[in-house]
Amino acid sequence: MKESYKEMIRLWKRLYVDAFERTTNVLPKVRGVLLAYNTNIDAIKYLDKEDLEKRVEEVGRENVFEFIEKPSEKVSSLEELFAGILRSIKYGKAMEWFVENNEVRAYLKEWGWDELRIGGQAGIMANLLGGVYNIPTIVHVPQNSEIQAKLFVDGPIYVPVFENGELKLFHPKEAIEREEDLIHYIYEFPRGFKVFDIEAPRENRFIANADDYNARVYMRQEFREHFKRIAERVDLAVISGLQVLKEYYPDGTTYKDVLSRVESQLNILNRLGVKSHFEFAYTANEVVREDLISMLTKFTSVGLNEVELASLMQIIGDDTLAQEVLHADVFAVIDAMHLLMDETGIERIHFHTYGYYMALTQYSGDEVRDALLFAALAAAGKAMYGNLEKMIQIRDALSVSTNERAFPLIEALEKEFGMEDGVIDMTDRQLAFVPTKIVASPKSTVGIGDTISSSAFVGEFALMG
Ligand code: AMP
Ligand code: GLC
């Protein structure tokens, strides 16, 4: 190994340890975080080759295979369901399709699951921020069924309830309603998973979404009517779940009806000085995606991966840049982040991909880098354990080695921009770069992105003091 790489290993080991200590010390300073809008039940099944092959044969292998290359992007039959699963395996791609048909929903329920977990970006972040970081967290739950409520861990996690006009905060378990179970069936597979002649190039998951509420970004009455009083309780807000919006709905409403409500809530957050982060998930509809870009001007921060940033470059950049970003070409990603910041004026952009993260900010400080390092530990902990329950699991991730494949990128950035210890001063902007820790055989993949973005956003705020 090159001498300079050995030095880098030592340097990043030290930076990781320091960042962990520093961040965990200051997390208790955060007064409160608001998480909205999508919470659901994730019913996770780790796919089994024989079981899956048997089920595909039952439905008709030929019919299913025919649909693999003609993705319907939704599930209205068992053929489409299995074609979706097989397509996700074939390309190692995360996919999520809405289940329209009640018979298929019944089949999914019958097929069962290995594990139930809280799902949706808001739900996942609540269990992490409230349950592990012990930060008071108010979470939006479109429905608060018993099954879902019990998936929230103990800790300062709250749903707002108004009693005689007074705002009260209860743990979801103390505010259960006879409401619907919003179930997302998640089929996880490891790298190299083989079914028929298909082999997964990487681990990932297919999600069959049987949830009519989050699909419309349903907002509870408490949030529609009393948002200001809820927002007054927090320092930070993380918004997610808008990726599912469609241009038009059969009842004549459009995505604009939802976005205008979200915008008025953002105005309230801004008036109150609450910093807001938008967790950008892949938004299939281009018209909606374009409007989401316009809405970024109202946010403090945005988090995205290579697929999501590329999808924005198709709109505000060009196809060549989008392609380069998709392959996580580091210089292209930096150009794209600058372009997005120019276009929206947003103060912070956090990019994450397999192997490294970057944050472009309109302010400077090593805290930005340290928060990314803390987030990388949380991500590795999540990959190792599937579910994070205790801070010690995040500390355990310190033992995972730093991704050496990112070292040539570090050298290139040092040469090109004079980067020092992962930080580049760009006069009016700062870029922070960190090599991450990659867990060789992750237990599960769902929710790692949410873990990264929320840990970095909240960690940075705490560190900045
Ligand atoms: P997303 O693409 O938003 O779902 O987030 C997935 C992110 O999780 C990737 O960008 C990686 O940074 C991270 N990740 C995925 N697999 C692993 C792993 N095995 N170990 C550590 N981090 C991972
Ligand atoms: C999407 C899925 C949800 C999952 C989450 C993880 O919101 O609908 O089931 O928990 O992504 O990021």
Image (spheres, grey):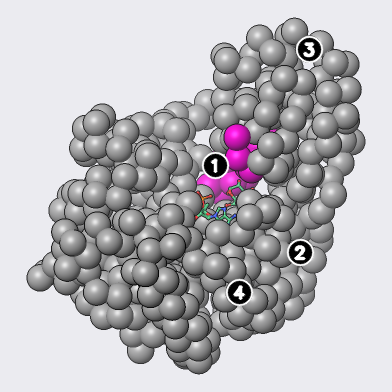
Callout 3 secondary element:
helix
Residue 187 image position (x, y, % from top left): 73, 40
CA–CA distance in space, label 1 to label 3: 33 Å
- The residue where tag 3 is placed is 61
- The residue where tag 4 is placed is 399
CA–CA distance in space, label 1 to label 2: 23 Å
Q: Amino acid at mark 1?
A: Arg
- The residue where tag 1 is placed is 216
Residue depicted at x 31% and y 62%? 410
Mark 3 Cα shell of 10 Å, populated few (<14), some (14-19), many (≥20): some
Is residue 387 rendered to the left or right of residue 58?
left
Q: Give the mark nearer the N terminus: 1 vs 3.
A: 3
Pair 4/2: label in front:
4
Q: Could you say which quadrant of the image residue 312 lies in?
A: top left
Q: Amino acid at mark 2?
A: Leu
Callout 4–callout 2 Cβ contact below 8 Å = no
Residue 293 vs 162, above or below: the answer is above
Report whether the residue tagged 4 is closer than 8 Å to ligand 1: no
**What segment carries the magenta color?**
201-218
Pair 1/2: label in front:
2
- The residue where tag 2 is placed is 151
Residue depicted at x 83% and y 23%? 53
Is residue 135 rendered to the left or right of residue 209?
left
Answer whether residue 307 is magenta in the image.
no
